Image (cartoon, rainbow, N blue to C red):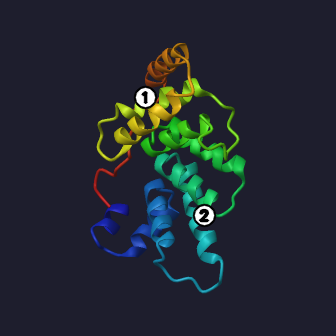
Amino acid sequence: MTVLFITRQGFSWLEMAAEAGDPLAQNTLAGIYDDGDGWFLIPGSRDRTIQKWYKASAEGGYPKAMYLYANYLFEHDGKKEEVAYWLKQSAENGYASAVGNYALRLAHLPNDLDYPKNMIEAYGLAYLMSKFEGGGTAGEDGRMILPDIAEKMTEQEIKQGLLFAEEWKKTHPPLSYFVPVYGY
């Protein structure tokens, strides 16, 4: 159904795919509504619908949606604990943009989600990003934030951060932007 929407066979196919539980369709539908498309009669129903589809997609296991849902909650005064939960889930599931945000927040740069400060993990994650070669800006972003984190660490902590990065690579999916195979 999602493919039928992408091949311009009608918006209703995307809605049916989202209703059927396709996390990519749910995320795409939330993004379309978030961009202002679609028609909503009752005030506030657009925001509720956007939140519904981002949440459904995140709960369906789509790492990019986990990140977008966390951002949506953050921008709409969602509970800090829920924002922190979804950002961490997205990072742990390999979404490249989430890893950088999560690393900065572990380093308390800024401390707006109340994660326990962990410079070793922050450095390890930033290091992984700095080595990312899958397109986009993740590699460059990692190289930019790495010195900001490193300046607050000892040489021993940096070595521990590198060991953390190696362990993370063994126990987590590789970093990705989760670009759909068939586009959109």
**Rounded to the nearest whole Å, what is the CA distance between mark 2 and mark 1?**
32 Å
- Residue 135 in the image: above or below residue 106: below
Identity of the residue drawn at 58% across and 45% down: 87
SS class, disc 2? helix
Left or right for 79, reference 125: right
The residue positioned 52% from the left and 43% from the top of the image is 101
Q: Residue furthest bottom?
A: 41
The residue sitting at the top extreme is 156
Q: Quadrant of the C terminus?
A: bottom left
The label number, if any, that marks residue 51 in the structure image:
2
Q: Nearer the viewer, mark 2 or mark 1?
A: 1
Residue 167 to residue 133: above or below:
above
Instruction: Give the number of callouts.
Output: 2
Which residue is pictured at 61% across the width and 61% down the height?
75
Q: Report which residue position mark 1 lands on.
A: 127
> Three-letter amino acid code at disc 1?
Tyr
Provide residue 158's location: percent of width, then percent of height. Answer: 50, 19
Q: Nearer the viewer, residue 127 or 2?
A: 127
Query: What x and y, as percent, mark residue 36?
Result: 48, 76
